[in-house]
Image (cartoon, rainbow, N blue to C red):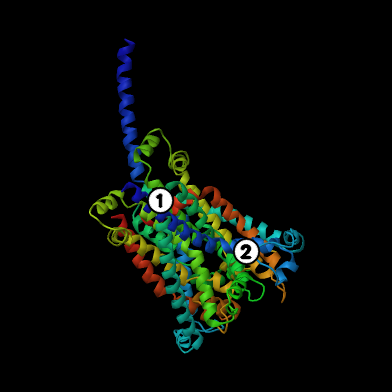
């Protein structure tokens, strides 16, 4: 009797549970409201602190120095007639391309070398190599600033001991540029190494084995297996580094402040000099915006590369 | 034959260790030189005699003592610690919510937002600091460390969201269905299931947020002028240099101490960070 009464109940429970499950699943799939709410802080951040400031900076760049009047493209026209601006363009490109090239080359060599070691040692060397990248850049650059000091410090001591003439590293235009590139290479090489090492680990070992059996030497393996397999990651890392290097501020600001005679200014430091220190906000905004096309092109290709590596 | 392979392998290893030694000297010389200088007496730093790469006239802790007693170093340290902690918490909350939503719930435009997140990650700080300077001025936050709570997350949140999406996406969907059947709501599911599984991703994101915020230089340089509000990086670089006399010992002591927290963090948790970094930018 009781069993008879319980049976439909149990059935009803089971039915209810199924119904609840489907309604819950439906709720999961059709929960755009919850999804939207959870993304809201991010949306506010992107719209309020990236998109809006970007357009606002375009507007700012079109004002006169006292920000009372719209002068359209006059600031940009003025920049084009300014010798210092062209110097900044030249220095920025020289700095970026030289530094990215050497970071990519040294990072690749280091990654290959570490990858050749027995597995146990790899972790340690990878970890120690990361030190330059982990130290806050403004502070490690302060250390370099002291290294470059001409009379009491390390670099000139070594030069003199080796029989060369001491150099005034940061006062001579050529050596000042050399110095900012050197510090950037020191700082950025570990990042390239990490990325390349991760790439090297993802190449199937069988590829190398079968190539060896076919008689391929180490250079052929590098040329026909390693480089093609790493093509995408090399491209992404270099483009990413191009953005970060091009927009660098800390190194130049601490080492040379753009000197001697503006020879080492990059877009970032020059924009800071004009916009914050000299109080010409519109002109500073204009200088920073000139970076945008370069950044946008790099970003476009990075995005394409990342998408491709997903597929 | 086997013997010759073995000797060749050994020759390769010798070359490898030689190359690594050169790299290590290059990488570690600056911190070594900084540490050395910070323990030298002023007389020894200024003396031109002897080999500068060793301490020959006795080590001293005076530069560190002076740093704490005669400079504003502790104020900077306190400011940086407060800002870094708050920025890290704030950024992680925003990123976790967004990453959960983008990887699981899916709504119209989620794909576009995902791409947007990636693109904002590529926006460097030198591009937008001038409009920020104006906006912070309107808000009355110029020369206040709190202004940094607003601008630091712009660089941090996109990357943290990006790596967390990767970690969340690797959690099997059966898990959340089971949790929902048991009557869990989205918040419970996020807290009880997603976060525990995504701990490596959270550690990587936290480390990233911490280091970016700790090392921030341009924003405090542009927005903060007074010693009471200044952060460690800018404070060390600008105020520890006094007049024409460079106090190299004290300067290096300050720089080195300020570098220590991120370096220690990496020494212990590096593997998390590397997996986050490489997965974030290669797999996506």
Position of residue A178 relative to residue B205, above or below, is below
Mark 1 lies on a secondary structure that is: helix
Mark 2 lies on a secondary structure that is: helix
Q: Look at 44% across and 75% down and name the residue there.
A: A291
Quadrant containing the C terminus of chain B in the rendered view: bottom left
| Label 1, residues with CA under 10 Å away: few <14, some 14-19, many ≥20 | many
Marks 1, 2: nearer the viewer? 2
The chain carrying label 1 is B
Instruction: Kindly identify which residue carries mark 2.
Output: B33
Q: Is residue A260 visible?
A: yes
Percent from the top left, x then y, of residue A260?
57, 82
| Label 2, residues with CA under 10 Å away: few <14, some 14-19, many ≥20 | many
- Disc 1 to disc 2, C-alpha distance: 41 Å
Q: Is residue A133 left or right of residue A143?
A: left
Percent from the top left, x then y, of residue A162?
57, 74
Percent from the top left, x then y, of residue B247?
71, 69
Which quadrant holds residue A26?
top left
Q: Look at 65% across and 58% down and name the residue there.
A: B257
The outermost residue toward the top is: A1
Position of residue A270 relative to residue B108, above or below, is below
Tell which of A206 and A131 is nearer to you: A206
Q: Is residue B93 visible?
A: no
Instruction: Kindly identify which residue carries mark 1.
Output: B165
Per the rendering, the mark at residue B52 is none
Discs 1 and 2 share one subunit: yes
The chain carrying label 2 is B
Q: Look at 47% across and 75% down and name the residue there.
A: A95
Tell which of B282 and B126 is nearer to you: B282
Percent from the top left, x then y, of residue B84?
59, 56
Tell which of A189 and B155 is nearer to you: A189
N-term mark: 1 or 2: 2
């Amino acid at each position: 009797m009781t069993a008879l009464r319980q049976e439909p109940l149990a059935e009803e429970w089971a039915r209810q549970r199924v119904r609840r499950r489907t309604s819950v699943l439906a709720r999961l799939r059709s929960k755009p409201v919850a999804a939207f709410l959870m993304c809201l802080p991010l949306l506010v951040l992107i719209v309020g602190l990236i998109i809006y400031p970007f357009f606002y900076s375009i507007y700012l760049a079109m004002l006169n120095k006292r920000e009372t009047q719209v002068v359209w493209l006059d600031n940009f026209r003025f920049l084009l007639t300014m010798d210092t601006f062209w110097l900044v363009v030249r220095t920025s490109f020289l700095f970026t391309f030289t530094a990215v090239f050497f970071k990519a080359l040294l990072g690749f060599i280091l990654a290959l070398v570490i990858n050749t070691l027995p597995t146990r040692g790899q972790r340690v060397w990878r970890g120690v190599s990361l030190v330059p990248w982990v130290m806050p850049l403004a502070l490690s650059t302060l250390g370099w600033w002291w290294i470059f000091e001409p009379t009491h410090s390390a670099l000139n001591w070594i030069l003199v001991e080796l029989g060369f003439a001491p150099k005034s590293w940061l006062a001579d235009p050529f050596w000042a540029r050399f110095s900012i590139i050197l510090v950037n290479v020191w700082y950025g090489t570990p990042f390239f190494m990490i990325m390349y090492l991760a790439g090297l680990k993802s190449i199937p070992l069988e590829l190398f084995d079968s190539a060896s059996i076919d008689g391929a030497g180490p250079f052929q393996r590098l040329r026909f297996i390693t480089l093609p397999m790493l093509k995408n990651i090399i491209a992404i890392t270099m483009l990413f580094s191009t953005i970060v290097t091009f927009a660098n501020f800390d190194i130049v600001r601490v080492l040379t402040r753009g000197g001697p005679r503006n020879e080492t200014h990059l877009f970032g430091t020059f924009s800071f000099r004009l916009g914050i220190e000299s109080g010409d906000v519109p002109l500073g905004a204009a200088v920073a915006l000139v970076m945008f096309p370069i950044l946008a092109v790099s970003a476009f290709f990075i995005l394409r590369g990342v998408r491709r590596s997903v597929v | 034959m086997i013997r010759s392979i073995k000797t060749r392998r050994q020759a390769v290893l010798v070359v490898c260790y030689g190359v690594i030694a050169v790299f290590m000297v290059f990488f570690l010389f600056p911190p070594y030189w900084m540490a050395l200088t910070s323990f030298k007496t002023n007389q020894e730093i200024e003396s031109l005699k002897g080999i500068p790469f060793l301490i020959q006239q006795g080590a001293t802790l005076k530069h560190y003592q002076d740093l704490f007693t005669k400079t504003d170093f502790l104020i900077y340290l306190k400011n940086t610690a407060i800002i870094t902690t708050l920025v890290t918490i704030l950024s992680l909350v925003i990123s976790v919510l967004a990453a959960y939503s983008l990887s699981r719930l899916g709504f119209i435009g989620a794909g576009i937002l995902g791409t947007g997140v990636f693109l904002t990650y590529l926006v460097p700080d030198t591009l937008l600091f001038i409009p920020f300077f104006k906006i912070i001025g309107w808000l009355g936050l110029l020369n206040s460390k709190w202004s940094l709570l607003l601008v630091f997350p712009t660089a941090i949140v996109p990357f943290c969201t990006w790596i967390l999406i990767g970690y969340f996406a690797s959690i099997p969907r059966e898990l959340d269905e089971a949790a929902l059947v048991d009557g869990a709501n989205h918040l419970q599911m996020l807290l009880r299931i997603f976060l525990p599984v995504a701990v490596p991703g959270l550690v990587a994101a936290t480390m990233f947020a911490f280091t970016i915020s700790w090392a921030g230089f341009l924003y405090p340089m542009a927005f903060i002028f007074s010693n009471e509000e200044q952060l460690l990086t800018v404070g060390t670089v600008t105020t520890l240099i006094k007049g024409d006399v460079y106090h190299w010992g004290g300067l290096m002591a300050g720089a080195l101490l300020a570098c220590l927290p991120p370096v220690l963090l990496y020494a212990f948790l590096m593997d998390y960070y590397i997996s986050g970094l490489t997965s974030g930018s290669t797999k996506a």
